Image: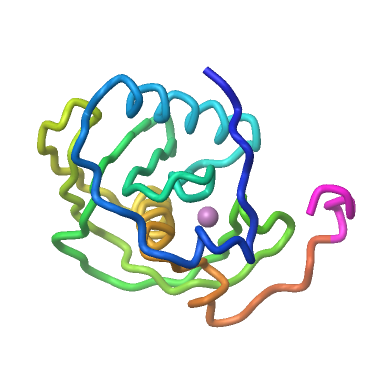
Amino acid sequence: MAVRLMRERGDEILQNSAKTVTRFDRTLQRLVLDMFETMYHHHGIGLAAPQVGIAKRIIVVEVDEQKLALVNPEIVWASGEGSDIEGCLSWPGNLGEVKRRTSIRVKAQNIHGEVIEVAAEGLLARCLQHEIDHLNGVLFCDIATRMLEKDPSVPPGNE
Ligand code: NI
């Protein structure tokens, strides 16, 4: 496993739609392991493949000990709406308020290509929507209802 280079806001790969995954091979498995390691390294709760420079529809999340790697994820049902504060590993130190659906169902494939469906609410639902947005070239700041003042506790070198 390896920590991969984090792409930051302004990088073109974060502005484009990622491609559907069709090969469920060792390369995919290695990428998913690296994505988890990169996410943990940066203390994140979710990561999308374009953030590590791979334009493919793959996300990983870990919220409340629920750890998921979803390939070609699609929101098939959504309910409720709520606002909360979000940040992004691709734009460290910046926070914004984003309106999201509060309960969702996501259809996806696992790393073996098997179709799965995941029900999520609260923070997990928010995190999944944030990561799926990355696959469509959307960053939280593009859809935030307001951005917060920059967090002064983040040293300039960390941005
Ligand atoms: Ni993000």
In this view, 138 is above or below 42: below
The magenta stretch spans residue 153: yes
Main structural element of the magenta stretch: helix, strand or loop?
loop
Tell me which residue sits at (43%, 74%) in the image: 99
Residue sitting nearer the eye, 95 or 74: 74
Tell me which residue sits at (15%, 62%) in the image: 77
Residue 60 image-quadrant placement? top left
The magenta stretch spans residue 129: no
Tell me which residue sits at (70%, 73%) in the image: 148
Along the horizontal axis of the image, is 58 left or right of 41? Answer: left
In this view, 144 is above or below 154: below
- Percent x, y for residue 132? 35, 56
Colour scheme of the rendered structure:
rainbow
In this view, 32 is above or below 149: above
Tell me which residue sits at (23%, 58%) in the image: 104
- Percent x, y for residue 147? 65, 76
Which quarter of the image is occupied by the C terminus? bottom right
Residue 70 image-quadrant placement? top left
Q: Single out the residue that lies furthest toward the left.
A: 115
Give the number of marks: 0
- Percent x, y for residue 32? 40, 29
Along the horizontal axis of the image, is 68 left or right of 63? Answer: left
Instruction: Specify start and end residues of the magenta stretch as a single range.
Output: 152-159
